[in-house]
Image (cartoon, rainbow, N blue to C red):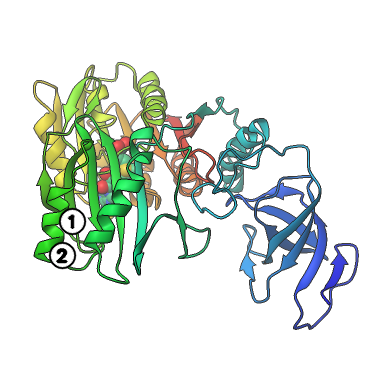
Amino acid sequence: MKRSFSNSKRRPQTSSEPLIADVTISEVGARGDGIASVEGVKVFVPLTVPGDRVRVRIKDGANEKSADKGEALRADLLEILEPGPGRGTAPCGHFGTCGGCTLQHMGDGSYAAWKVGLVRGALARVGLGDLPMEPLSRTPAAARRRARFAALKRGKRVWFGFNERLSHRLVDLEDCPVLVPRLTALVEPLRALLLQVLPEGGACDVIATDLEGGIDLVLVGPRSLDRTARERLVAFNEAEIARISWQPDDRGAPEPIAHRRPVAVRFAGVPVTPPPGAFLQASAEGEAALVSAVLEHVGEAKRVADLFAGIGTFSIPLAQRSAVHAVEGDAPAQAALNKATGSLRLTTERRDLFENPLTAKELARFDAVVFDPPRAGAAAQAQALAASKVPLVVAVSCNPATFARDARTLVDGGYTLKRVYPVDQFLWSAHVEVVGVFTR
Ligand SMILES: C[S@@+](CC[C@H](N)C(=O)[O-])C[C@H]1O[C@@H](n2cnc3c(N)ncnc32)[C@H](O)[C@@H]1O
């Protein structure tokens, strides 16, 4: 028989039996799990909201560090004894197993407040928590235009979808309320295609991006493609597919397999041809919110540097009114932006900004700097900016923790963090984007 104890009772010292506890969730942590306390130890319980009274099974050996670096435990939710006030109804049948969305069980108000709290919490941890926050920009359902699926062939079947949470097991996707309908409609045809392309036991990822002209597909991971597999890819008869590439692993460059139609994405009306699998903001709505915050503050600055510029999400709109220097580390992305510059006052440079950030001296010619690094943030570039005299810096980030770290560097260098914009473009996930405006 399973032993049961509540967080008011003592915890056994040793036990090989599963540990069952009745706990009350007090908050939701940065990864989206509810947090309860059992005898002073934090217990993370997925799929819960504050105020939930729940029965959980505490996992043996599932210790982890909590955000405050204390020891913490993980638990599985067994039963909701009394729901908390912030519960909602999950719209997706895969919710609970699929790792793509972990927060559909939250009512909309608590969900939005929690997302804003992620940004506020990260800033508070570096002593910048007392700033008023702009309202959360929201992205609706069915708006995600870029997704990375996983696929695995077993016997006469291909499993295709997203990984389960904290697992390599695949959720075999039927529907997805987050994706644009053109991507959801591709799930079944892709499953059928991969049944013919993958060897038995073979696996790959598929990056699908909805672009003007059609869908861009990159198969990542089949280590080799024989002639038959290539022919099947070329013959893949889905009207929506514009381009197919193959990349043996995450580091290599994608090799074109089929190119049926030109593809493009437009920034401020200017078409850019993204290289296969190029970075693109996850939704048009999220992109619009980020660009609008950037433009509002950069305003009429004469000379602007756009760092980690990608294929020009910010550079091109900025170049409608300023002279812009766009710096990007990825050669194909820089080349794509370079090709699109036309009559714009836009120069580009390929440069590794982790190893070789723009120095304070180089930065001296700009009236404003925009930077939008990957999740690791821009530690070295923030240091150089802190030592510069650039009057305005706008930081865009998909990671509140590194954003806060870099914000602290800028503030220590004499900048004031004036405005903070949280942007939710990864609906029902624990991710949130942020734009920060710094002046000196
Ligand atoms: C979050 S994306 C932003 C791209 C662009 N600003 C946009 O919104 O579409 C980060 C960009 O940084 C680039 N990047 C990553 N590491 C880099 C590095 N060490 N130096 C320069 N660019 C880098 C990536 O190639 C990517 O284009």
- For the residue pair 177 and 211, the one nearer the viewer reads as 177
Vertical order, 198 against 215 (above or below): below
Q: Return the residue nearer the eye: 328 or 212.
A: 212
In the rendered view, would you say 28 is above or below 10?
above
**Is 167 positioned to the left or the right of 213 in the image?**
right
Residue at (39, 53) in percent of width and height = 376
Q: Circle 1 sits on which residue? A: 246
User: Element type at marker 2?
Assistant: loop
**Quadrant of the image containing the N terminus:** bottom right
Q: Earlier in the sequence, mark 2 or mark 1?
A: 2
Helix, strand or loop for disc 1: strand
Neighbor class of circle 1 (other Cα within 10 Å; few <14, some 14-19, many 20+) is many
Q: Position of residue 316 (x, y in %)?
A: 22, 26
Label 2 to label 1, Cα distance in Å?
Answer: 9 Å
Instruction: Please identify the quarter of the rendering in which residue 157 is found.
Output: bottom left
Which corner quadrant of the figure contains ligand 1?
top left
Q: Is residue 407 left or right of residue 318?
A: right
Q: Residue furthest right?
A: 9
Q: Which mark is residue 225?
A: 2
Q: Which mark is residue 219?
A: none
Q: Nearer the viewer, residue 59 or 39?
A: 59
Question: Mark 1 is on which residue type?
Answer: Trp
